[in-house]
């Protein structure tokens, strides 16, 4: 059974893994296998393994920290604990915005899927160019409002709803993959196009991790640490839950990816290539081609359930995180006002929901929102190796109930990989994230220091390295857009400058 914070239950190892699986398996399973197949063909299998390996390494680094600091909401507070409050706020905003942006992506995923179920509905929901109409946007807002109502009326209703949804979205994806394999599985597809397993080049294997939703699909592992205090025997169960949830979801996603690749018409693959795929409701469309009409109905039903489970959880988590920032005087105090009956800030909930509505105005397809979400997810993940290295440096002798072998090396490698994946997101999402972080830093200085020039300047000095890092990564993202990053000079410059920034980030000082 899934577990929701505040429900009065103490999560066991199984429940903790269910939290991870429930958070990881959202809209990603509906679209990622299709976009990955279209972008890199059979090599998408490698992309999933690499993506899971990155998530697993980050999870293991986080596990060592989490067993030292068993605090609620640890992931968003990492740099506040290891460095200083001003520095930590930047990562908290990344974490919060990543949660918030996931919510419209889940709602849009449902509309993308269901809008294709019936042609007249599709014509009402979408313009000929594929953008949402006013009616389509209203439908997205209605779904998000439903997420809000589930949270607005308290944790008990959300917990009961989520328990059911978690069970469904664990079973249906795996079952869909096996049914595809049984219905039609063309092994020749894996080398049919250009007689190779990697028809579009090795570089695209890594780009697919961010552009096709693979990292997005695995990011939910971090939510397990929200419940670090409550989990039974956290020294043992927390690392196992992090590892277990990523591993279980990798198996599910691989089953889906392999079955999807094998289900496509081999003639189309051999003659037109994987780029020719054109599905709006990918898994349901494939099921229809295979004549599995009952599965089509099930997939359309699950397109409403699975994203709704994630959307509801992330809306509640995002609102509570904003409430916590209000309590810590990092955001205006109005967000800290708690409704005593339901023990949460409804102001934070409504504000978070309003941000979701605004995001959906500018990014009206799942893939567009997903890339923006991935940028904030990756920036928040930068905090993991930085905090890990700082603790290993400052507290080398402190007892760690879980200690990662070769952790120092793993910290550097994970930082370089996360930084490289950020460059693959492109200039526009990276620039947008930099602007949003600067805006919220100004809000923070107003709230915490009343925009006092001296205190605000010291606040910036206490966090300057993360802004410098985001600016530099945006520059390398521009090089990626111009196809100049993956040259010997481009990659060499990237790794050297990234290693320098790693040192600055780990050694960021506080200016009081």
Image (tube, rainbow, N blue to C red):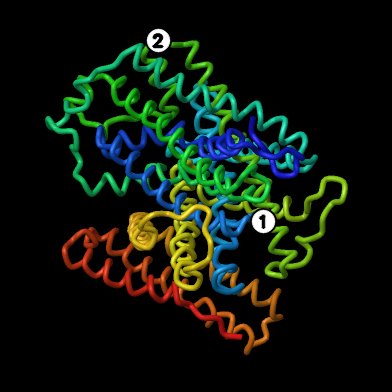
Q: Nearer the viewer, residue 27 or 289?
A: 27
- Would you say the residues marked 1 and 2 are in contact, meaning their CB atoms lie under 8 Å apart? no
Question: Does dot 1 land on a helix, a strand or a loop?
Answer: helix
The quadrant in which residue 136 appears is top right
**Mark linked to residue 291:** 2
Give how far across and how far down residue 341 sits, in percent. 87, 46
Identify residue for label 1.
321
Q: Nearer the viewer, residue 85 or 378?
A: 85
Query: Relative to 126, does residue 371 appear above or below in the rendering?
Result: below
Give how far across and how far down residue 218 sits, in percent. 46, 43
Question: Does dot 2 land on a helix, a strand or a loop?
Answer: loop
Res. 436 in view:
no
Mark-to-mark CA distance, 1 and 2: 46 Å
Query: Which quadrant of the figure contains the N terminus?
Result: top right
Give how far across and how far down residue 118 sits, in percent. 52, 21
Disc count in the image?
A: 2
The residue that appears at 75% across and 44% down in the rendered structure is 6
For marks 1 and 2, give the one nearer the viewer.
1
Query: Which quadrant of the figure contains the C terminus?
Result: bottom right
């Amino acid at each position: 059974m899934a577990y929701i914070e505040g429900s009065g239950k103490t999560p066991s190892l199984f429940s903790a893994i269910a939290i991870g699986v429930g958070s990881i398996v959202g809209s990603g399973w509906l679209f990622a296998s299709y976009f990955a197949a279209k972008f890199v063909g059979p090599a998408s299998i490698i992309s999933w393994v690499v993506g899971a390996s990155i998530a697993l390494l980050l999870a293991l680094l986080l596990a060592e920290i989490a067993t030292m600091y068993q605090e609620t909401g640890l992931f968003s507070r990492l740099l506040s604990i290891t460095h200083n409050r001003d520095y930590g706020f930047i990562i908290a905003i990344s974490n919060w915005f990543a949660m918030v942006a996931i919510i419209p992506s889940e709602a849009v995923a449902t509309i993308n899927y269901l809008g294709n179920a019936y042609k007249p509905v599709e014509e009402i929901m979408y313009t000929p160019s594929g953008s949402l109409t006013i009616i389509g946007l209203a439908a997205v807002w209605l779904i998000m409002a439903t997420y809000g109502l589930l949270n607005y009326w308290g944790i008990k209703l959300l917990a009961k709803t989520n328990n059911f949804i978690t069970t469904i979205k664990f079973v249906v994806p795996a079952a869909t993959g096996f049914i595809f394999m049984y219905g039609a599985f063309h092994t020749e597809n894996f080398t049919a196009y250009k007689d190779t397993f990697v028809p579009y080049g090795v570089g695209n294997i890594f780009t697919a991790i961010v552009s096709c939703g693979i990292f997005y699909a695995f990011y939910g592992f971090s939510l397990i640490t929200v419940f670090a205090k409550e989990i039974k025997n956290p020294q043992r169960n927390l690392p196992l839950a992090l590892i277990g949830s990523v591993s279980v979801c990798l198996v599910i996603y691989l089953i889906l990816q392999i079955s999807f690749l094998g289900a496509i018409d081999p003639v189309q693959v051999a003659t037109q290539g994987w780029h020719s795929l054109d599905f709006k409701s990918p898994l349901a469309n494939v099921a229809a081609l295979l004549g599995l009409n009952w599965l089509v109905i099930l997939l359309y039903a699950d397109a409403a359930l699975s994203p709704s489970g994630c959307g509801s959880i992330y809306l509640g988590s995002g609102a509570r995180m904003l409430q916590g920032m209000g309590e810590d005087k990092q955001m205006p105090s109005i967000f800290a006002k708690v409704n005593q009956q339901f023990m949460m800030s409804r102001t934070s909930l409504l504000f978070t929901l309003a941000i979701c509505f605004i995001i959906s105005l500018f990014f009206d397809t799942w893939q567009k929102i997903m890339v923006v979400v991935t940028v904030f997810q990756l920036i928040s993940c930068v905090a993991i190796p930085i905090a890990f290295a700082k603790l290993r440096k400052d507290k080398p002798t402190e007892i760690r109930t879980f200690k990662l072998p070769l952790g120092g090396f793993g910290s550097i490698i994970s930082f370089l990989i996360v930084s490289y994946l950020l460059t693959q997101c492109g200039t526009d999402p990276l620039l947008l994230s930099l602007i949003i972080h600067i805006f919220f830093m100004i809000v923070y200085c107003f709230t915490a220091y009343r925009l006092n020039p001296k205190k605000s300047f010291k606040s910036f000095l206490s966090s300057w390295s993360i802004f410098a890092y985001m600016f530099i990564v945006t520059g390398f993202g521009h090089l990626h857009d111009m196809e100049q990053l993956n040259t010997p000079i481009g990659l060499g410059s990237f790794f050297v400058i990234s290693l320098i920034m790693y040192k600055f980030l780990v050694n960021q000082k506080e200016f009081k």
